[in-house]
Image (tube, rainbow, N blue to C red):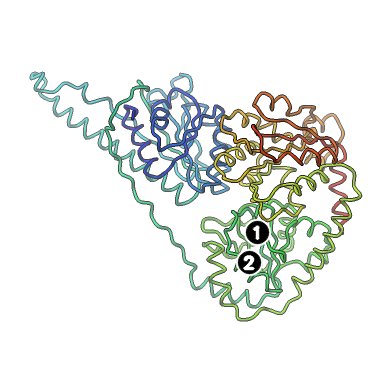
């Protein structure tokens, strides 16, 4: 097996292997050649070549999201590194471990007016868990003559000893920083940055390693809930007749079913779940906006909880955020091992543990339930809303709303559903989704910039087939995601094309004016057909509900290439139909 000659490159590669980082997403370049040669020559690693660094980073994020372990991304020096930033910020806020390996020029070549020599140290400072800036290896000591060969230069042996000492210090520093960075990514689930300077020559290889880096153990992190917090929670919980649990982004099977069943027995608790929560129970309340939007001020006061318990990632629903900021609970507890955002401006307790551990500690202590009609009242409201929902679907014309109803019902069991940001995830929130389907969405920063790339990364590593539902702007913005040689045949995309940023038509603004159409909605007449031809996707299109239904009958069947279905909807009616929906279901 060939190894890069540069000791620093060997050190990085060997420690990645020791930490079980198997997946390496590489973008082409010259300065990263030592690492590229080393990773691709070692059968331990699975390497992917993705040209566009922005897409590459989201692709890696999709893999890390599924395996829940760090994935490394590797690029050359200069502006290539900056293209990683959108995915790094998403990983930072979504708690997904990424290891960013950036190759760099030697220090004396930075900021001298040469090409691709930006200052790379701490470039992600505000959105990274650890920044390791490694030191350049000294030049090969074999090039220094020994004193016995040149008697007149008696101090050369001293120089060699000093050289070896310096190199040992450099090696020790680099090993410590690499270990610290990767351990942080594993322990705290987030992105870390390792900046690695290389001097030329870059392409030399050797048959044997010249270093034997030591892997530092990852410290065991255990956080028990302190007794005071438990006592406080127990007392308030026992006294409160109105308790609300709100669940944001959550991995499937994160909470044991027995605790969900136990919660469902308590009439003083209502559980509001987002589509991304991956939590299902017949007594819970999905489709939060459906419940909240039509409420009067008096009804909102009835819904106002005494205790709000939140867990999971960021919340999609703007309506629940607005409601809880105005009708604040007396107590807000957030359960998370790492962080607690004061989303509703009333956070009282950060419970630094997992939801499972919290419920395991709290619920068995409950010897009786508080008498309450809280859940019964809102369950009745939910039933009425659902009946109105079904009636509305029958009376409205062809639109985004109707399209999402048809699409979401069509998804086969045991699929992974990746949802694009903006309108797509908000429509998905209004419908019930088959509980065998796992749902993911980049809600850390909620950007449209890498939804397709993330979905493809997920599809490459997942044993289940993956479907991406996305809007036209999100899809076109991240179209380089299709420039990818690893897309499995069972990967599916549905693009809902309403010829612009449809979500802006729902927001306040002067609609149907040249200024609005161009600079907000960004109206266009583009489609995905030619992109599919270029990248080897089977392309289908539909413009009516009947056409969609017919195309979906074979859309999920086996094929020799991935498939894309583009659904065209009328641009100017979608906003009106959505806004009237909330009026109708009241």
Residue 361 vertical placement versus 318 (above, below)? below
- Going from the N terminus, do you reach mark 1 or mark 2 first? 2
Of all residues, the one furthest to the right in this rendering is 395
| Rendering coords of residue 266 (x, y %) | 68, 74
Residue under numbered circle 1: 279
**Mark 1 burial class by Cα count in 10 Å: few <14, some 14-19, many 20+:** many
Q: Residue at x 10, y 23 (%)?
A: 154
- Residue 262 in the figure: left or right of residue 98: right
Specify the label residue 260 is tagged with: 2
Depth check: give the residue in front, 400 or 518.
400
The answer to whether residue 1 is above or below residue 323 is above
Marks counted in the figure total: 2
Q: Secondary structure at mark 1?
A: loop
The location of residue 77, given as percent across then percent down, is 46, 27
User: Residue 501 shows which numbered tag?
Assistant: none
| Rendering coords of residue 382 (x, y %) | 80, 63
Quarter of the image containing the N terminus?
top left
**What residue is at 71 percent from the left and 34 percent from the top?**
564
485 lies above or below 584: above
Instruction: Tell me if 565 is positioned left or right of 156 in this view.
Output: right
Q: Quadrant of residue 420?
A: top right
Q: Quadrant of the C terminus?
A: bottom right
Instruction: Look at the numbered discs 1 and 2 and tell me whether their residues touch, using CB distance below 8 Å.
Output: yes
| Location of residue 15 in the rendering, given as x and y in whole percent from the top left corner | 36, 41
Label 2 sits on a secondary structure element that is: helix
> Residue, x 22% and y 26% (percent of image)?
141
Residue 202 placement: quadrant: top left
Image point (43%, 37%), residue name: 45
Q: Quadrant of residue 480?
A: top right
């Amino acid at each position: 097996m060939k190894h890069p000659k540069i000791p620093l490159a060997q050190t990085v590669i060997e420690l990645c292997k020791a930490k079980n980082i198997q997946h390496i997403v590489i973008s082409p370049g010259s300065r990263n050649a030592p690492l590229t040669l080393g990773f691709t020559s070692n059968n331990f690693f699975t390497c992917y070549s993705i040209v566009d660094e922005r897409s590459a980073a989201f692709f890696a994020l999709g893999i890390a999201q599924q395996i829940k372990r760090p994935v490394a991304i590797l690029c050359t020096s200069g502006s290539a590194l900056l293209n990683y930033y959108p995915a790094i910020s998403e990983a930072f806020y979504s708690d997904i471990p990424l290891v960013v390996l950036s190759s760099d020029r030697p220090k004396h070549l930075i900021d001298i007016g040469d090409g691709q020599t930006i200052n790379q140290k701490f470039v992600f400072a505000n959105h990274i868990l650890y920044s390791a800036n490694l030191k350049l290896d000294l030049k090969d000591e074999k090039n220094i003559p020994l004193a016995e060969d040149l008697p007149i230069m008696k101090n050369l042996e001293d120089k060699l000893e000093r050289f070896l000492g310096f190199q040992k210090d450099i090696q020790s520093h680099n090993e410590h920083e690499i270990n610290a960075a990767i351990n942080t990514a594993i322990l705290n689930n987030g992105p870390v940055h390792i900046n690695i300077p290389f001097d030329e020559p870059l392409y030399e290889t050797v048959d044997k390693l010249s270093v034997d880096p030591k892997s530092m153990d990852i410290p065991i992190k255990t956080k028990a809930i302190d007794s005071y917090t438990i006592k406080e929670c127990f007392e308030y919980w026992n006294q409160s007749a109105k308790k609300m649990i709100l669940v944001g982004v959550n991995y499937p099977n994160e909470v044991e079913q027995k605790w969900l069943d136990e919660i469902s027995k308590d009439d003083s608790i209502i559980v509001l779940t987002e589509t991304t929560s991956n939590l299902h129970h017949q007594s819970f309340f999905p489709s939060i906006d459906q419940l909240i939007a039509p409420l009067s001020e008096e009804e909102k006061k009835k819904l106002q909880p005494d205790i709000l318990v939140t867990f999971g990632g960021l919340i999609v629903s703007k309506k629940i955020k607005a409601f809880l900021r105005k009708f604040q609970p007396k107590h807000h507890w957030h359960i998370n091992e790492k962080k607690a955002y004061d989303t509703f401006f009333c956070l009282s307790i950060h419970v630094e543990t997992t939801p499972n551990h919290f419920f395991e500690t709290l619920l068995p202590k409950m010897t009786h339930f508080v008498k309450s009609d809280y859940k019964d009242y809102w369950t009745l409201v939910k039933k009425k809303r659902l009946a109105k929902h079904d009636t509305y679907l029958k009376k409205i014309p062809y639109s985004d709303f109707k399209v999402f109803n048809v699409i979401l019902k069509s998804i086969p069991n045991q699929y992974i559903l990746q949802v694009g940001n903006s309108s797509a995830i908000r429509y998905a929130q209004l419908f019930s989704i088959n509980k065998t389907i796992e749902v993911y969405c980049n809600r850390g920063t909620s950007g449209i910039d890498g939804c397709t790339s993330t979905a493809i990364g997920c599809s490459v590593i997942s044993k289940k087939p993956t479907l991406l539902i996305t809007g036209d702007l999100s899809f076109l913005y991240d179209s380089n995601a299709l420039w990818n040689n690893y897309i499995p045949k069972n990967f599916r995309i549905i693009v809902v094309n309403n010829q612009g940023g449809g979500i802006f038509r729902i927001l306040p603004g002067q609609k149907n004016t040249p200024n609005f159409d161009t600079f907000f909605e960004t109206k266009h007449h583009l489609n995905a057909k030619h992109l599919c031809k270029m990248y080897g996707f089977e392309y289908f299109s539909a413009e009516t509900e009947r056409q969609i239904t017919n195309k979906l009958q074979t859309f999920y069947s086996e094929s020799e290439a991935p498939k894309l279905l583009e659904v065209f909807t009328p641009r100017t009616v979608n906003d009106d139909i959505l806004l009237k929906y909330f009026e109708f279901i009241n």
